[in-house]
């Protein structure tokens, strides 16, 4: 399994009424997946192993999103699962593990420190990308 395959599986799992776009540009980098439900923006960074890098990436882009998650293949040990959850909990970020299905193991806390104009710019970009991709 590659990170790209994990993103593809997630994107192919549709949710009614949610715009779900991959590789969305924000602050000079590309976010793995952005979702917009008409009110809230959710950012999801995908990793196979390096969850610490996802912490850094989410901290860099959290000013445009209401909710922030990492998604990764479920670790084999309970200790590793708990370590990841505890680290992400410190920042209010959520955790999704994949083990044949995507399961939220820790909900994201709603971010209240949002740069509204940048969030609006992101939503506009997502809608343009959705229309361009013919969704």
Image (cartoon, rainbow, N blue to C red):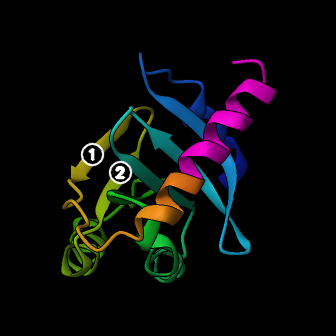
Q: Are marks 1 and 2 in contact (CB under 8 Å)?
A: yes
From the top left corner, tell me how far across and down residue 36 is, in percent: 45, 39
Tag 2, which secondary structure?
Answer: strand
Q: Nearer the viewer, residue 131 or 14?
A: 131
Does residue 133 appear to the left or right of 37 in the view shown? right
Looking at the image, residue 69 lies above or below residue 132: below
Quarter of the image for residue 17 reads top left
User: Is most of the magenta stretch helix, strand or loop?
Assistant: helix
From the top left corner, tell me how far across and down residue 109 is, in percent: 19, 61
Does residue 116 appear to the left or right of 67 in the view shown? right
Q: Residue furthest front?
A: 117
From the top left corner, tell me how far across and down residue 16 is, in percent: 41, 16
> What's drawn in magenta, residue-wise?
122-135
In percent of the image, x 54 and y 81: which residue is there? 53
The residue beneath circle 1 is: 104
The residue beneath circle 2 is: 96
Query: Can you say which quadrant of the picture contains the C terminus?
Result: top right
Does residue 61 appear to the left or right of 15 in the view shown? right
Q: Residue furthest right?
A: 132
Looking at the image, residue 21 lies above or below residue 122: above
In percent of the image, x 62 and y 55: which residue is there? 32
Q: Earlier in the sequence, mark 1 or mark 2?
A: 2
Q: Which mark is residue 32?
A: none
Does residue 24 appear to the left or right of 60 in the view shown? right
Crowdedness near tag 1: few (<14), some (14–19) or many (≥20) residues, C-alpha within 10 Å? some
Q: Is residue 1 visible?
A: no
In percent of the image, x 58 and y 55: which residue is there? 121
Q: Nearer the viewer, residue 121 or 80?
A: 121
């Amino acid at each position: 399994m590659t990170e790209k395959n994990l993103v593809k599986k997630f994107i192919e799992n549709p949710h009614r009424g949610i715009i779900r776009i991959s590789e969305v540009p924000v602050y000079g980098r590309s976010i793995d997946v952005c979702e917009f439900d008409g009110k809230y923006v959710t950012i999801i960074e995908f990793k196979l192993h390096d969850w610490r890098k996802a912490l850094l990436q989410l901290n860099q882009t959290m000013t445009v999103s209401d909710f922030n998650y990492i998604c990764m293949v479920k670790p084999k040990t309970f200790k590793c699962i708990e370590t990841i959850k505890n680290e992400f909990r410190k920042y209010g970020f959520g955790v999704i593990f994949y083990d044949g299905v995507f399961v939220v193991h820790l909900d994201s806390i709603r971010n209240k420190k949002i740069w509204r104009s940048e969030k609006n710019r992101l939503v506009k970009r997502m809608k343009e990308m959705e229309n361009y991709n013919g969704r």
